[in-house]
Each structure stands twice: as structure tokens, then as C-alpha cells.
Image: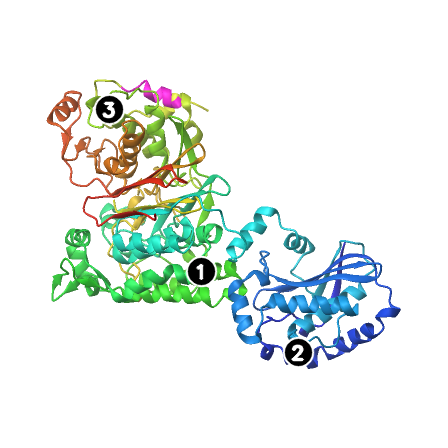
Amino acid sequence: MTRRLQTPRHSSPRFPLSARRCRHLYTIIAAIVVFVAVFSGCAERIRLPDGRFVVAYGTYAAEGWAPVMTIEIESSTVRRASLEYYSPIGERYTDQTFIATLYAREYGYPPSTAFSRLQDAIIAEGAVPEEIDGVPPDIHSVASVLWEAFLAGHEQLEDDVIIVERAGRSVVTAEEVRAWLAPDPKTAQWMARRAGLGDRLPNVGPPAAVSNHTIATQAGMEILSQGGTAADAAFTIGAVLSVVEPFFSSVLGGGSWILYYDAERGVVDAVDAVGPAPAAATTDRFRDTAYLSRDGMHRANVPGAWGGWMALLERHGVMPLDDLLEPAIFYANNGVPATGMLLTSLRNNDSFVRSFEPARSLYVRNNNLVSLGDTIRHTNMGRTFQRLASAYDQNRHRGEIAAFRAANDFFYRGPIAHDIVAFSEQNEGLLTREDFAEYAGGEIVEPISITYRGLDVYQNPPNSQGIVMLQALSILHGFNFSGMTPTSPNAIHLMTEALKLAFADRTRYLGDPAFVDVPVDTMLSTRYAEFLRDSISPDRAMRWPIDDRLAAYGDGGHTTTFQVIDRYGNAASVTTSIGISFVVAGDTGIHMNERLAFMSNNPDDPNALAPGKKVRHTSNPYIALRNGVPYIIGGNTGADVQPQAQLQQFMNIVDFGLSAQEAVDHPRFRTRAFPDTIVPYSVINDLLLEAGYPTATRNELASRGHTVNTGTYYGHGHVIIVENHPAGDISIGAETRQVESLGTVLR
């Protein structure tokens, strides 16, 4: 049973930091202290009950901490009387290094010292003394109330919990208190690490990172050198990339899919950081394809990236958010040089950039687009980052988790959402405050995986289209590629046909699983892979429309990617995108996604527009484990190029024996024999080969019925190969096409 006792409304616990905050309590609790003093003076005449007792406040202070006292008595002698404050999720007040620093600054010692002195005094006196040297009045007052409650309820059974109600109200339950006092080992370890205490994971090997831009990689490596995890470094890289290539991706305005290998648990997590369509987004509204094709705020969904990153950092990060954002804030305020990729993107969107004031103010000078090397300052974006860092910092006294959640709420239910919505309303957008507030935030979900050549290959589940890569690999697993090279016509033909079949299933079946039934298990089954494999002709190319093989079977770019591995063995593979957008949300400086253009205005399509529905997202990085630890951490950008180029990158390493850099540098191909993922959903039925393929290869593929053309864009790819982490045997492949990539191993 749980014993509930009443306490006056005014005796709610206070934040034990400043004596100034609690002086008004003296008068309020004077009667209580006198009452306790009487008991203290008569302690020898009161036989204390033997056993273990827990007394807890039933409500939280404004700062979110609930005091709990654990009392152990043996032979009527107090052996233990420990006081601790707990957050709603079980964080211990004394574990918070930030709080300890502030507390010590005011009192000269951390709160743990005050709690220890309190316990020593209670043990010595057999009660709470009227005064205790070195214990602030607020802590002393709380201890007095809890001790009084113990004396009044000591007839209860051993190991029970006494809840001190406030004005007949209690939100803290006995079950919560028991969980706080006896967390499972994993939770205890996680709490300690999140608080910056306890042993972190043992060093496994050197950290490494690779991204599209030199300064982003360098910023991430600095976080890794300070002991940050792969989650910490990946977030910093993503934030800096939001500044140096905001037209590609944004941790603020975009959407992401993340794979994260947790070395301690030995498992891969997937992070769904994709936001939903606004409530006003319907196929009727977007029936006019020209309207859906036009750039603007009307094509923005709720940006899910920030929520996903906060979920990842809450689970796997160890560093403060303001430290992780510092590099992005610096570069946003001080400026970065315009890159060739920016200029290409600006030229491709010239008319919109010139007509849209927030973009024009950033990228047009003297009526000309900025030039290569010009300094671009994103001061508004820097201010937004700083506001989020401040929201986190101002709530750290409530605990690290509460601080991260405060930063998340500041974005989705606070001033950032307000500013984005206000801009949206002024610019024909559909987003509302309700759309933001109702977004549940990023989710950590189960990834999908297959086994290929003894490797466990992980991808992101639907709504991501990562299943395309895995399905194509499953089909190809039954072919023998020995003796072939990446330029062999046979290899390219088989890979292309497998991709066509996988994309055909994607087009017909893949959407938001909350809205449509996606038969993932069937699509990745060995039997279905064999069924599809049998439909591939060795000498004849398929063309769209491709028959619905799954029904016949009947079994019941515009993006960035980066990869990180830390010294503890954790690894992150990230692909994040806004859909190449120069829709800058006014004074927030946030480049907004235009992801609704990646949904269908056909109501019968599994990826059809619908209120609250998530887009079939093109982001899909991968991780391959060998013997249970990361071996290949890779990704490639480019919408529907992604699974195709990633398949080639992976097979270049596994089947053709190329090094990491060779796998990235090797010429790529892409098929377009399926409806494109973006409006107007074109089908071109050709096979694009990047420059560098032999003429004989092109001719042989053409003889098999492929319409062979030469393309210019095949996305940007990066990969980390970890042959032996403890030995430092790590190699990196960094993109050399168009972007200023950098891959680094910290030796």
C-alpha cells in the first residue's frame, strides 16, 4: 500500500539553489519546524520503527524536481536518512554537473555535500535538528517536512512509500518513486552518462568523420576529440552544413533519416526525423500539378529534422547542446565563402531567388548572384540557433533531458514555430501552429535489414525508401559476380534490372505506414527475392511499365549525407534534406523544405498527399555490420539516385574489392525506368552512365535493350570502412564531385 499524508499548500519543495528563494518559507513552515523540534527533543522517548521507509513529495517544484528521503532504521537507531531530488524521468539532482557548478558558486560546495551533512546530522541526533551547519535553509526545511511525514506514517509496512500530498493533490506516484530509487542497470548507466558522470564507454579506436564540406567535418572532429559521441559529432556536422550548404539540408527546416549503431547495446537504431504534411495539404488542393510544381512555402511540411536530432541527442549524446551549436553559430555570424555548388544551385533557381525577398537579400548583390568565394553571412539563422541554445541553457537546472526537451518545445510549440507560421501565412503557405504543436517529434524506431555475403546491412524503414537498396541487394545476392568489375556489362545489367524491380514495388506499395499497409516482410523475404530474380533476363532490359510482381507473387537530389564513428565504437550514418530550396522563412533564416512536391496528387497513390501524412522520404543512409560491429558506414545523395548509388558503393567494396575512395570515385550509373519521386513524376526509361565507362560497355548494354545516355548528376557519396577499429585500420572515401568534401581519421 501507499500512505498519503497531507501537507499545507505552501510547503511545496523549492529549488535548492539560492537561499534568497526560500527565506519566505521560514514563517510558513515555522509551525512544522517547531513540531519537528518537539519530536527531536523527545527522540529518546520515541521508539522509531525498524525498517526501510521512503517519503516523497507528491508534487514537483516549479523547476521540476521532487524531493525523496530514504530512511533506514535498525534497533530504533537511524542508519540512513538520505535526501535526493528527482526529475520526472528519474534524473538525480546531485548528478547534474551544471547544477553542481552553480550551487558551488553560491554556497562553496555542491548539493551532494549539503545532502551528506544533512544525513550525518540526522543519524547523530536520531531526528532532524533545528539547525545544521553547512545545510542551506531550504534543504533543511524540506527534510523537516519529510521527517514529520515519516513520524506520522511510520506504522505502515516496511518498503512502502509515503507520499506527502499538497493541498490534497499528488502527481508523483509510488511506482515512480520506486523506479527512481532502483533504476535498472542500463537506465542508471544512461542517466549517469547523460549527466556527464560515470565511466563512459571504453575507447575502442580512433574517431573518424566525412561530410560534404571541410569546415563541417572539422567541426565534427573537434567534438569527437573532446570525447563527444558519434551522435554529438553528427549533430554538429549537420548544424554546420545547415550554414555552409543550407540549400541542401537543414537541421531546422528539413527532414532526416539517421542510422545509429550503439556500441554499448550492440544494436542499430533508426531515427525518423520526417515531419507530417499540414492539415490543409490535400490532393484536392494540389490537383493542379502546376501549383504543386511551383516553388514556395505552400510545399513545406512540418520540418521534422530538429525533433529527430533532439531525440538522438537525448538518447545517445553526452555533450551540452550549446557546445554542439557553437560552431554553427560562429560560421553563421562570421560568414562562409560561396561554393561552386551554391552557385550552380542559384543559377538553376535564378528567377525564384531574385523574386523571393528573404533569398534575394542573402544571395543577390548589386542585382547579380553572389560570386565564387563571396562571404555569405546567415546572421538570422545564427540568431535562431542561439535562441534554441538559450532555451536549452535556461532549463539545464531542471536536468539535461528536460533541457533538451525545452529546446524541442521552443522550436515546435514556442517562438520558432510562431515565426515560421507567421511567415507561412504571409506567403501563401499552409503551416499552422496546430500543425507544429501536434507533431509528436522525432522517433527512434527499428531499422530494416538483410544479410548479404555474411554482412548485416541496415536501412531505414518506411516512410524512407531505404527498402529499395535492400530489396535490390536481396535479388542480387543470388548472382555470382566473381570475375566481374564495376564496369562489366553483365554487372551493370543485373544491378540495373534489380533496381527497376525494387523501384516498381516502391512506386506501388511504399508510403507512410501510418496510412498504408507496406508489406516490408514480404518485400525483403528470400522467397520473394528469388521470385524477382527469376524475372530478370540476362540479355534483355525491362522497360516501364513493369508488371506488378508483388501482386503476382501473392504472398500472404537534393540532400546531404555524412558519416561518423567515435572512439567508443558508436557510428552514425545520416542523410538529411530540404529538397534543394531557397525558401527562406523570413527573419528565422531557416531554409524550409519543399517536401510536399515529393508526394502525389493522385489519391490512389500510396504516397498521396493527406493531412498529417509523412512523405515517402528519399533519405536512406546505410550501415553494414561485420561480426556485430560497424564495417561499412555509407550514404549517397540525390533523391532516387540514393539507393542506386549506395548499392553501387556497397557492391564496389564487397563484390568488386575496391577501396573506400575508389568506391566513391568510380563512375556511377542510374536507371530512370520508373516514375520519378518528384512532381511531375516523369518516366524516361533510360540508363544514364557517368563519363568514364568504356565504349564497349555502353554498346553492350545498348544491345540488351537499354537506352544509354550520359548524365551529369549522380549525387554525392561518402563512406567509412572500418577494417579493424582497435588497430586504427579505418579508411574514408570522400566525394570529389562538385563539393568540398573532407574525410578525417583522428590518429
Q: Is residue 305 above or below residue 666?
A: below
Which of the two labelled residues, at mark 3 and mark 1, occupies the earlier sequence position?
1
Residue 278 shows in the view? no
Kindly check if marks 2 and 3 are in contact, taking CB atoms under 8 A apart as contact. no
Choose between 432 and 468: the one closer to the eye: 468
Q: Is residue 383 above or below residue 734?
A: below
Name the residue that disc number 3 marks.
Answer: 491
Identity, as a three-letter code, of the amino acid under mark 2: Leu
Name the residue that disc number 1 marks.
Answer: 320
Choose between 467 and 157: the one closer to the eye: 157
Kindly check if marks 3 and 1 are in contact, taking CB atoms under 8 A apart as contact. no
Q: Give coordinates of residue 156: x percent, y percent.
A: 81, 57
**Quarter occupied by residue 161:** bottom right
Q: Which mark is residue 25?
A: 2
Q: How would you rate the neighbour count of disc 2 (Cα within 10 Å): few for under 14, some for 14-19, many for 20 or more?
A: some
Spatial distance from mark 3 to mark 1, Cα to Cα?
Answer: 48 Å
Which one is closest to the eye, mark 3 or mark 1? 1
Q: Within the magenta stretch, is there residue 534? A: yes
Residue at the (14%, 35%) spot, across then down: 691
Q: Give coordinates of residue 108: x percent, y percent.
A: 57, 74
**Quarter occupied by residue 56:** bottom right
Q: Residue furthest right?
A: 45
Please provide the residue range marked out in magenta: 528-536
Choose between 261 and 526: the one closer to the eye: 261
Q: How would you rate the neighbour count of disc 3 (Cα within 10 Å): few for under 14, some for 14-19, many for 20 or more?
A: some
Identity, as a three-letter code, of the amino acid under mark 1: Pro
